[in-house]
Amino acid sequence: MDWLPAALVVVLAMGFTYTNGFHDAANAIATSVSTRALTPRIALGLAAVMNLLGGFVGVRVAETIGGDIVTVPVGPTGILLCVGALVGATGWNLLTWWRGLPSSSTHALIGGSAGRRSRPGRR
């Protein structure tokens, strides 16, 4: 059962990634579609390909966030930090999507991480 907390984080990360995809995809292609420079199908396909390639090109942003902005502790505290950040960011994504408000999923995740880490009464 040592794998259960890690599996929970992976499932929550997949849920966040899903909400990030449908939440930020509209922001990424809105200008090119609204100006009729691209059809919605071509713009979405182009965004999907570029997002996939971006994941393979580099991890500098992830290294900066994980090393300089938020220090994730090892053990149960680190798992709780990840769970809190992912639940908060996913909830924020769903709320802003439901209300039609523009927001950044990445900023929500960083804010959830920083907020969870800076809670009152922490050691």
Image (cartoon, helix red, strand yellow):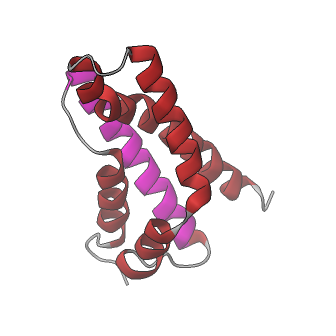
24 up-or-down from 58: above or below: above
Judge by depth and name the residue closer to the eye, 45 or 72: 45
39 is higher (above) or lower (below) than 59: above
Q: Residue at x 29, y 64 (%)?
A: 115
Q: Where in the figure is residue 31, as x and y percent of width and height?
A: 23, 28
- Residue 10, given in percent of the width and then of the height, sits at 64, 49
- Taking the spot 57% from the left edge, 53% from the top edge, the residue there is 55
Where residue 78 sits in the image (x, y, percent)? 54, 70
Q: Looking at the rendering, which quadrant does residue 100 occupy?
A: top left
Q: Which residue is depicted at the point 36% across and 38% down?
A: 91
Q: Which residue is the extreme one toward the bottom?
A: 123
Q: Is residue 60 left or right of residue 113?
A: right
Q: In which quarter of the image is the N terminus?
A: bottom right
Question: In the picture, which quadrant includes the C terminus?
Answer: bottom left
Q: How many labels does the image show?
A: 0
Of 76 and 11, nearer the camera is: 11
Left or right: 45, with 69 as reference point: right
Q: What span is colored magenta in the figure?
A: 77-100
48 relative to 113, above or below? above
Picture coordinates of residue 4, whole percent (x, y): 73, 53
Q: As rendered, which of 118 and 114 lies closer to the eye?
A: 114
Report the residue that reaches farthest toward the front: 37
Q: State yes or no: residue 79 in magenta.
A: yes
Residue, x 36% and y 36% (percent of image)?
Answer: 24
Magenta run includes residue 101 = no
19 above or below 56? Answer: above
Q: Nearer the viewer, residue 93 or 63?
A: 63
Q: Is residue 83 left or right of residue 68?
A: right
Secondary structure mainly formed by the magenta segment: helix
